[in-house]
Amino acid sequence: MAYSVKEVFYTLQGEGHNSGRAAVFCRFSGCNLWSGRPEDRSGAICKFCDTDFVGVDGDGGGKFTTANALASHIATFWPLGSNCKPFVVCTGGEPLLQIDQDLIAELHRAGFSIAIETNGTIAAPEGVDWVCVSPKHGTELKTVMGNEIKVVFPQETNPREYERFSFDHYFIQAMDGPSQAENLKAALKFCMDNPKWRLSLQTHKLLQIR
């Protein structure tokens, strides 16, 4: 299949369990919970997304006709001569609209450990090395087990409802936007009251990196 990618870039992971880890980010175009167009936000299932995932015009973005072509492109962003295993974070938008077994195989062939950041409404394919689910209120999770669940807070769903699913790590992350300071205080209180949950900060925004 062909792959539509908004952008590819090298940075430090800013959120969740792998925060601070060097990674190539591959941001896929498109999402099943919002079109990405401002005029559609009010009617979208996910109304608070802070990411541009429309089109293929970002740095390193484009259309790739084969899994090998995309994996080879991603590999060019990892530092030459690095003595650690390459790490790629596949995000979006919703990356599972496009990620398939061919791409997983090609990324592994290129030496990468593969992480995905998904809204969880599509079942994660086999072979992904790190699964992070960020659930959105009003959706049915199809990926109900993985390495971490990262709940943007607050939403109408109580995060504790996700404790019935099987994840290694449980994170709360304050919703960005005009009420971010208030949301952070609420997230701090939730984590203090519910020690199963850990606080995730968007450190890339604090550091002003991508």
Image (cartoon, grey):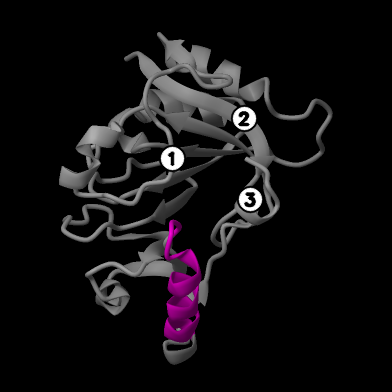
Q: Secondary structure at mark 1?
A: loop
Name which of mark 3 and mark 1 comes first in the sequence. 1
Question: Which mark, residue 204?
Answer: 3
Residue 188 image offset from top left, x and y in percent = 50, 80
Q: Secondary structure at mark 2?
A: strand
Residue 33 in the figure: left or right of residue 87: left
Residue 16 image offset from top left, x and y in percent = 54, 60
> Label 2: which residue?
9
Residue at x 17%, y 55% (from the top left corner): 139
Q: Secondary structure at mark 3?
A: helix
Residue type of the residue flagged with mark 3: His
What's the magenta bit mostly, secondary-structure-wise?
helix
Residue type of the residue flagged with mark 2: Phe
Q: Is residue 2 magenta?
A: no
Residue 60 in the figure: left or right of residue 121: right
> Label 1: which residue?
51
Residue 81 image offset from top left, x and y in percent = 84, 28
Name which of mark 3 and mark 2 comes first in the sequence. 2
Instruction: Look at the picture and state if 197 lies above or below 72.
Output: below
Residue type of the residue flagged with mark 1: Thr
Instruction: Look at the picture and state if 78 lies above or below 200.
Output: above
